[in-house]
Structures are given as C-alpha cells and as structure tokens.
C-alpha cells in the first residue's frame, strides 16, 4: 500500500498548514507507515516543522502528531 508521510509547517494564518516535505512510502499496512513516521520524528529536524502526519492512499489522515509531543 502507498502512504504519504508529511512534515507540516504552520503556514500562514487562515490558510491550510504548509507541507514542507512529503515522503511517498510503500508499506504493507498502516502500522508500518506509522512506525516509519515515528522513526522520522526521532531522528530528523526540519526547520519550521510543526507536525508530522500520515495519509493513506486516498488522502485520509491516519496519524497526526505535533512535534512538541515527542
């Protein structure tokens, strides 16, 4: 299955959050995609990043975490 792991910035007030980086991830299921997102959270710093989210292949959000919630 395909999942999208987004590193999200705050964006401009009144607008959608800005996607700073997107990783297209091929994993057997959502648990594996969540594990990959958690690895990114623990090992990478993104300037201006506020959150990480995982979307399924239909664009539905299945995981969202503010970076200060590590």
Image (cartoon, rainbow, N blue to C red):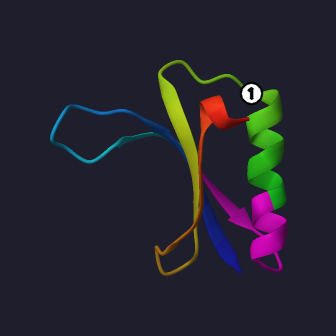
Residue shown at 76%/61% (left/top)? 34
Residue in the image at 26% along x and 48% along y: 16
Provide residue 61's location: percent of width, then percent of height: 51, 68
Vertical position of residue 31 compared to residue 14: above or below: below
Membership of 27 in magenta stretch: yes
- Inspect this view and state whether residue 22 appears: no
Seen in the picture, residue 16 relative to 27 is either above or below; the reply is above
- Depicted 65 relative to depicted 31: above or below: above
Tell me the quarter of the image containing the N terminus. Answer: bottom right
Residue 16 colored in magenta in the image: no
- Residue 60 visible in rendering: yes
Q: Is residue 53 left or right of residue 33?
A: left
28 above or below 9? below
Q: Residue extending furthest top?
A: 47
* Magenta segment: 23-34
The front one of 25 and 42 is 42
Residue that badge 1 annotates: 44
Per the image, label 1 sits on a secondary structure element best described as loop
Q: Quadrant of residue 2?
A: bottom right
User: Which quadrant holds the C terminus?
Assistant: top right
Q: Residue at x 58, y 75 (%)?
A: 56
Residue 19: x and y, percent? 42, 43
| Residue 32 x/y as whole percent | 84, 67
Q: Nearer the viewer, residue 28 or 39?
A: 39
Crowding at mark 1 (Cα within 10 Å: few <14, some 14-19, many 20+): few
User: Residue 39 is drawn in which quadrant?
Assistant: top right
Q: Say whether residue 59 is left or right of residue 64.
A: left
Q: Is 1 displayed left or right of 28 in the figure? A: left
Q: Residue at x 36, y 33 (%)?
A: 10
Q: Which residue is most to the front?
A: 69
* Count of marks placed on residues: 1
């Amino acid at each position: 299955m395909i999942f999208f792991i987004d590193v999200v910035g705050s964006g401009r007030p009144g607008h959608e959050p800005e996607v700073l980086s997107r990783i297209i991830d091929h994993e057997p299921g959502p648990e594996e995609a969540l594990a990959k997102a958690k690895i990114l959270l623990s090992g990478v710093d993104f300037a201006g990043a506020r959150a990480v989210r995982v979307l399924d292949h239909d664009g539905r959000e299945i995981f969202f975490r503010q970076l200060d919630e590590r």
